[in-house]
Image (cartoon, rainbow, N blue to C red):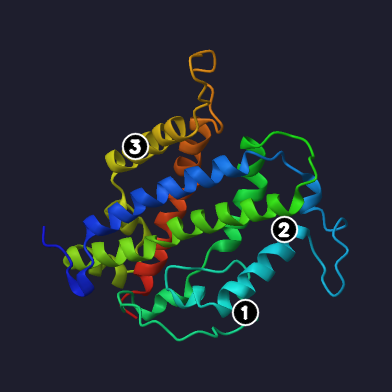
Amino acid sequence: MAKAEHNNVTLGMVRDSLIRQEDTTVYNLIERARFPLNPPTYDPSYASIPGFSGSLVEFFVKQTEAVQAKAGRYDNPEEHPFFPDNLPPSLVPHYKYPEVLHPAAMSININKLIWDMYFNKLLPSFVSPGDDGNYALTAARDLECLQAISRRIHYGKLVAEVKFRDERKDYEPAIRAQDRFTLTNLLTFTNVEEAVKKRVAKKAMTFGQEVKIGDDGDKGKYKVDPAIVSGLYADWVIPLTKEVEIDYLLRRLG
């Protein structure tokens, strides 16, 4: 199979990046698990901030994204804000990122789905109940998790682009027919997906072990349950990445 070489991007390079991003995601989940749920962080009635209506975590994310936008974070096509409306422009010189993706990629942002999944499904499954008052730190760890998961899922645009270039003759008819079913089949490699799920579980076991010198009493105890990390990928990261890939490909010939 020929490899796409435009702008020096290959499928192997993309896969290497996805594997490294797994490390970031697992570490961020471990860091968030240091704190209990801390419900006031998500309660709009807790944070009475003048001129703002919403929860502390929403305030924290919006303010942080505004600062990062000024510093040029969202000039990078791999980055996607959770609150893109009314973001300030970058105040730093623009870096010329390689133009790898079709311009339609700019219209794809599924962070609303990721936000809902994280707070309503994932977060309650891996943090302990309770309140230790560290609400700002909790919001900061949440944002790190959200950004890592978002980056990984939206990387599907680049995955789709490289696959399209490598096998254009297979993808083009399905794109012209707007055939999501065929595109899903072309993009699905069950053995690869199973390997990913096993690998992230292994990373959660390795990175999250409770280590005590000369004491094996905590063997098998982890800071984040490896099954939850594997489930995150099985139920959300892999399916949503595929949705991003399909949405991108359906626009690719436009």
What's the distance in space between the residues labelled 3 and 2, CA to CA?
34 Å
Quadrant in the rendering for residue 3? bottom left
Q: Is residue 226 above or below residue 8?
A: above
Direction front: furthest residue: 213
Residue that carries the numbered disc 3 in the rendered image: 194
Q: Earlier in the sequence, mark 1 or mark 3?
A: 1
What's the distance in space between the residues labelled 2 and 1, CA to CA?
17 Å
Direction left: furthest residue: 1
Return the mark for residue 87. Answer: 1
- Residue sitting at x 78%, y 40%: 132
User: In what element is the residue under mark 2?
Assistant: helix
Residue that carries the numbered disc 2 in the rendered image: 57
Callout 3 environment at 10 Å: few (<14), some (14 to 19), or many (20+)? few
Q: Is residue 64 left or right of residue 204?
A: right
Callout 1 environment at 10 Å: few (<14), some (14 to 19), or many (20+)? some
Q: Amino acid at mark 3?
A: Glu
Q: Is residue 14 above or below residue 98?
A: above
Of circles 3 and 2, the one toward us is 2
Q: Does the CB distance between marks 3 and 2 fall below 8 Å? A: no
Q: Earlier in the sequence, mark 2 or mark 1?
A: 2
User: In what element is the residue under mark 3?
Assistant: helix
- Residue sitting at x 54%, y 13%: 217
